[in-house]
Amino acid sequence: MAVSGLSGIESMLQQMRAVVQAAQNNGVSPAELAPQPASFAAELQRSLQRVSAAQIAATNQGKAYELGAPGVSLNDVMIDLQKSSIAFQTAVQVRNRLVAAYKEISAMSV
């Protein structure tokens, strides 16, 4: 049981490193991914950057698996792809809610 917990922690650390590496390859510094006190717009932008970084990391991990890189298992690739898909779907739903709220507020002022 303890070995399983350690491999889970190692897997999580590997995923975190992959996200940071993908962000750095995309021109985003790790400091930009760190939480900072800011406005709603800044928080929304950081969230979108995290979604993008997750998608890039999942895609890169999938490519690494296809190329036969050691230490990359199909299970991890599939889980990361699902995580990035769910993050993207969540971002789309947030956008939809923001647009609906904007339309509702602009209709109130008429």
Image (cartoon, helix red, strand yellow):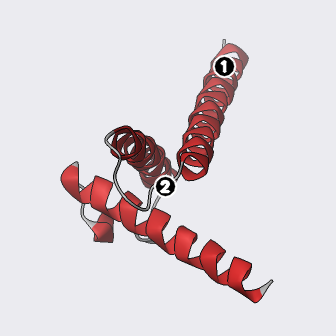
Rendered image: mark on residue 33: none
- The residue under the point 34% across, 53% down is 69
Q: Taking 41 as reference, is 63 left or right?
A: left
Residue at the spot of label 2: 43
- The residue under the point 22% across, 48% down is 26
Place of residue 98 in the rendered image (x, y in percent of width and height, measured from the top left): 62, 30
Q: Are marks 1 and 2 in contact (CB under 8 Å)?
A: no
Query: Label 1: how many residues lie within 10 Å, few (<14), some (14-19) or many (20+)?
Result: few
Residue at the spot of label 1: 109
Q: Amino acid at mark 2?
A: Glu
| Residue 82 figure quarter | top right
Camera-side mark, 1 or 2: 2
Place of residue 18 in the rendered image (x, y in percent of width and height, measured from the top left): 38, 60
Query: Label 2: how many residues lie within 10 Å, few (<14), some (14-19) or many (20+)?
Result: some
The residue most toward the bottom is: 2
Q: Taking 44 as reference, is 7 left or right?
A: right
Place of residue 105 in the rendered image (x, y in percent of width and height, measured from the top left): 68, 24
- The residue under the point 45% across, 68% down is 14
Which quadrant would the N terminus be assigned to in this image? bottom right
Please say if 89 is above or below 36.
above
- The residue under the point 57% across, 52% down is 76
Per the model, the C-alpha gap separating discs 1 and 2 is 27 Å
Question: Would residue 27 be seen by someone viewing this image from the given angle?
Answer: no
Element marked by disc 2: helix
Please say if 109 is above or below 52.
above
In this rendered view, identify the residue nearer to me: 79 or 110.
Answer: 79
| Residue 91 figure quarter | top right
Question: Would residue 46 be seen by someone viewing this image from the given angle?
Answer: yes
Q: Taking 48 as reference, is 87 left or right?
A: right
In this rendered view, identify the residue nearer to me: 6 or 12.
Answer: 6
Q: Amino acid at mark 1?
A: Ser
